[in-house]
Image (cartoon, rainbow, N blue to C red):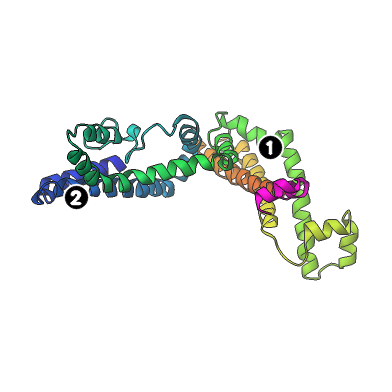
Amino acid sequence: MGLKVYERINEILDKNKLLHRLPEPYNVAAMLLIIALLGTAIRIVATVYWLVRRPLQTLRDTPRNWLRQSLCTDFAHPPEVVPPEAAKGSERVPTFKALLEESRLADTARDHVLTVVIFGPFIVVGWLPSVIYRVSFKATALAYTPFIWAAHATLRNPLPLKTRLERITKSELEKVRRGFSWVILTTLVAKVALLFTWIDRAYIESKFPSQKFVASFVILERWPWWQITLATDAVLTFVLLFFADAALARLDGQETWREATVLKTLATVSFLRAALSIVTVSHFFHIALLAAAPNSVLRLLGS
């Protein structure tokens, strides 16, 4: 879609010959600058547009894109305004390789300087965003890894629909997760009851393992963000159970739900639940790391 828009705007510019009215080499510089701005803008707009329009497909393709950017594309590979796999050999899309070859054709030092001056804005506007994106993507690759795994496991699950539904309703892992969810929801309901004085505080506190548990986990004075993520995770666990059970019951009946709708719902809820779990576990891992790490590591972490 981005490539089609890119080529269409180039055709309009060529047809109206607006830039050809400028004297050389200013017309070349203006054309290169407009192409660079246009390519960068289209890449951003097209990505956001399809993320909003088809979020599941975007998330489903994320693991493959992440692997290519992080592990397969090295820094020696030249960045492009429009990715080569999207350009599909279109001659109307400029490439960094062609630009370098053009600069090597200069015969004199003056021509080299003139080439740098003309192509300089094009390089900065067109390719610098791609370089920054690549460097930042690789630098934070480890932080993205758990979410890439979650997207691959939930959105690209190859199992048949019936098998996926049965694993949600009958697997031992899901049973353990529902048991943990019951504990979380019961604890938070008890906290709400205490805050609104529906139940005597001494009675509730006597049911918990220790006062330290109440102070560090229940935290009556406020609602930390990780309690919200835990509660949402627990609720989604039961939503997933009820939905999977209902879909499984209708699988062989006359009122069968559409398979595509069921798969999208399973994938969406599963991914949200996995992402919330990763965020929450990462928070507690950070706390444990700060508690167990030596002072040298703490200084390195800036804590």
Q: Nearer the viewer, residue 152 or 253?
A: 152
Q: Is residue 55 left or right of residue 102?
A: right
Quadrant of the image containing the N terminus: top left
The residue singled out by tag 2 in the image is 30
Q: Are marks 2 and 1 in contact (CB under 8 Å)?
A: no
Quadrant position of residue 133: top left
Asked if residue 301 lies in the magenta stretch, the reply is yes
Question: Magenta: predominant secondary structure element?
Answer: helix
Residue lying at 81% horizontally and 69% vertically, measured from the top left: 198
Is residue 283 shown to the viewer in this render? no
Q: What residue type is labelled 1?
A: Thr
Q: In this view, does 183 lie to the left or right of 270?
A: right
Q: What residue type is labelled 2?
A: Ala
Is residue 175 shown to the viewer in this render? yes
Q: What stretch is highlighted in magenta?
A: 287-303
Across and down, in percent, residue 56 comes to 48, 42
Quadrant position of residue 210: bottom right
Marks 2/1: CA distance? 62 Å
The residue singled out by tag 1 in the image is 169
Residue lying at 23% horizontally and 49% vertically, measured from the top left: 34
Residue lying at 66% horizontally and 49% vertically, measured from the top left: 301
Disc 2 secondary structure class:
helix
